[in-house]
Structure formats: structure tokens, C-alpha cells
Amino acid sequence: MRVSILSALTLLFRALASAAPAPVPQEAVSTTTLPDGATTVLPVVASTNTSVASDQLDDLASFAADYTNSTFNEASSKQKRGGCTLSNLSIRREWGTLSATEQEAYTKAALCLQAKQAKTPSSLIPGAKSRFDDFVGTHINQTMTIHYTGTFLAWHRYFTWSYEQALRNECGYTGTQPYWNWGKTAETGVESSPIFDGSATSMSGNGAYVAGEGNVVLGGNGLPDLLLPRGSGGGCVTSGPFKDMKVNLGPVSLGLTNGTSESNGDGLSYNPRCLKRDLTTAVNQKYANATAIVNQILKPKDVYDFQMTMQGYPGSGNIGVHGGGHYTIGGDPGRDLFVSPGDPVFYLHHGMIDRTWWIWQTLDIQERTGAQGISGTGTFLDSPPSANTTLDTVIDLGYAAGPPVTMRDLMSTTSGPFCYIYL
């Protein structure tokens, strides 16, 4: 079922009406017991001090890793997990902790994927020229059924993992999918981070500075405008491994810095152009700082609240850590909900989305990896109305990757096709 872009934007803008986030209470802790009987102390509310919140996030991530490792020591763990064991468990790490060799191996594999012939027939997506484009095209075609839906979290988990597998199986990459810890760049500034500093070991730097740009304006439809500041670039990326890459698909709904948007129809035709970025530390610091991340993990008690907080509640004025990451990148296709995987750093961003979900799931593993860990329907904010998403709902990535799987296969990072955790 297809929804017009105008209708999509109307629904999305309702999630972004201006309002100040609620103040975060002072930190507190509780004692939690691991499956092997060991105990650990965890925060129960996010600190308003981002340095303290960063430590809280480290504690929560360590707990999630320890919890997963301890379950492998259970007598029945191998039976429960199928082929996932401690011996083949993969570890996903933050970009800045990788060695220069590991960083360069990842970007070389991404460039390799961009050089390989697309699998998608040109009759379906005429502009898809590479295996990298297969993923972008799939995301464009499914955007309205994978955001503000019951599949949002699991679909992107499978999508990111499938991209990682393509890098490994088709381009000889031997590492794992790295992630972007937004809390770190909120402290250091985006442009000085190892991800965006423009060096040979980065994911490429900022776009060239474009003078005279204004704010990005979100809102409309009778709701107050939400203004996001422009970043420090705006033009073509000029440094790092992806300075010469071409974005072939889109735009579909590209937010510009003059309050308008740009579209090239359905975004599926061939439209080669440079990769643009408009790195915006102010957006990172407001919506995806360490306090926001820890609050995202600790405050929601059910998956509906978790995924809506992450994407931005309608009328809340908070674009969530999901929107915070995308609008920190900015540019083209960074500000395009449909085409955003056209920037290779998308996968580091969604690595962190998945890490955040993984940590949250581990705090109540039985509830949050089963049927109660799913909420929503199959359409964007249930418009038009559609069936509820269940454990039996099928996820199909088309020509990007396969095979189709059910939601039940995607609820844990150590079951179904998966066998990984995060540090």
C-alpha cells in the first residue's frame, strides 16, 4: 500500500512540533542480578550531567554484554541459541576504538560494494547501479512501512546486519559493523571526531561550506515550526574515503535550509550527484547527547514508548536520538528520510540505534525479545490503518539481501541469523 510523499511528510511533521524536553531527574542506582548469580549496580534515571551520563551508558553497555555472556554459561543456552556460541560471537565496536587498519578496511569494503553491479533489475529501480544502491533502493521503497511502524527496530537491525554481511561475503571485509556513539561526538564536536574528521581513516568529513543558508524548518499543518540550525558545511564532501562517491538515487523528500524540500519523483531514477554533508554539532548536542541516550534506555518501560521516544512523539518537539543522528549528518541524502542510506555513515548511525535497543532489551530480556517486544502496525503512524505487526510478520529486503525472515527471528542479536553483541 503506497502513501503519497505529501501525506508522509504531514505525518512526520506532526512528530516534530516544538516543545522543550522534560527535565531529567538526578541519578540513582539499583542492584541487578545476572543469570549466573553475579550482581551489578545500574543507574535507574539518566544524569543531567552528560559526562556522568556517558559513564552510565558505559555501565549499561557492560551489563548488557555481561548478561549475554552469562547466559551462554546456562546448560541449555546452546540449544536455545542454535548455532550462536561464545566461540563464534561477533563483537561490534565504536568507530574510534578500531585501529587505522580496521577503519580503512571498512571504508574500502564500502567502496567495493559501490563498485559492484546491482542485483536489482533496472525495470524496478532504474537508478540502482551498484550493490550499495540495492540497499538504498530497498529503503526508499519500504520507507513508509518501516518508520513509525511495528517493524522499525527489527527491520533496521536486519538491514544493517545484511549490509555488514554483504561487506564480508562480497568484498572480503573481515571485521564487524562499527557504530557511532552520538554521546562522544556531542562532547568533542562532530567535525573533530574520528568518524568525521576527513582523514583517510574516517568516514569522510564535512561538506564544503555554503554561505547564506538558513535553518532547516520542520512543522507545518497548523503546528508550530521547529527550527534546526544549519551546520558548518552544506556542499559536496571534500575529504576522506568517500569524497569522490556518487549518490545515484533520490532525492525523495530532502529537507533544505530555506524551509522547503526537494524531490526527484519517487527517487528511483538515475540521478548521480556528489555526497553532501552539513555536520551540525548543535543538533547532536540537543537531541543525541549522552543524557538523551541513557534516558532513551531507562525511561521507556514498553516498546511503544521506546520506539516512539526514539523517533519523536507526535507533538513533542523532540526528534529523538534517531532524528538527532540523521540531522547531525545533514546534507544530501542525510536529511532525506527515504534516501538516507545513500550516505555510508548511515550504517554507523543505525549500529548505534541497534545497540541502544539491544541494551534496553537486555534490561528485561524475556519481555522485550518476545511478543510483548513488538508494538505498532504495518504503516507509518498507522496511516492508512493496517494490521498489527506480530512475531509472524515477514521482513523482506528484496534484491538487497535475503532471505525473507519473520519478526521472531530478529528479536535477539544472538538468535535467528544473528550472533553478535556490542561493546
Image (spheres, grey):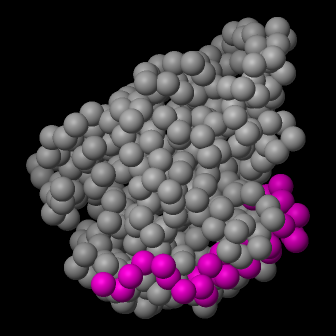
Q: Residue at x 22, y 58 (%)?
A: 9
Q: Is residue 296 visible?
A: yes
Highlighted range, magenta? 95-123
Q: Residue at x 42, y 64 (%)?
A: 398
Q: Is residue 299 above or below residue 394?
A: above
Q: Is residue 48 visible?
A: no
Q: Is residue 201 magenta?
A: no
Predominant secondary structure in magenta?
helix
Position in image of residue 236 (x %, y %) = 52, 86
Position in image of residue 107 (x %, y %) = 71, 75
Q: Is residue 111 above or below residue 221?
A: below
Side (left or right) of 390 relative to 289 = left
Question: Foreground residue, 16 or 154?
Answer: 154
Side (left or right) of 76 relative to 181 = right
Q: Residue at x 35, y 49 (%)?
A: 147
**Which of the image's four quarters has the C terminus?**
top right
The part of the image, by quadrant, that contains residue 199 is bottom right
Position in image of residue 47 (x %, y %) = 63, 26
**Which of the image's four quarters has the N terminus?**
bottom left
Question: Foreground residue, 222 or 158?
Answer: 158
Side (left or right) of 189 relative to 404 = right
Q: Is residue 267 above or below residue 35?
A: below
Question: Foreground residue, 138 or 233?
Answer: 138
Q: Residue at x 48, y 79 (%)?
A: 119
Side (left or right) of 412 relative to 187 = left
**Farthest residue in the left direction?**
222
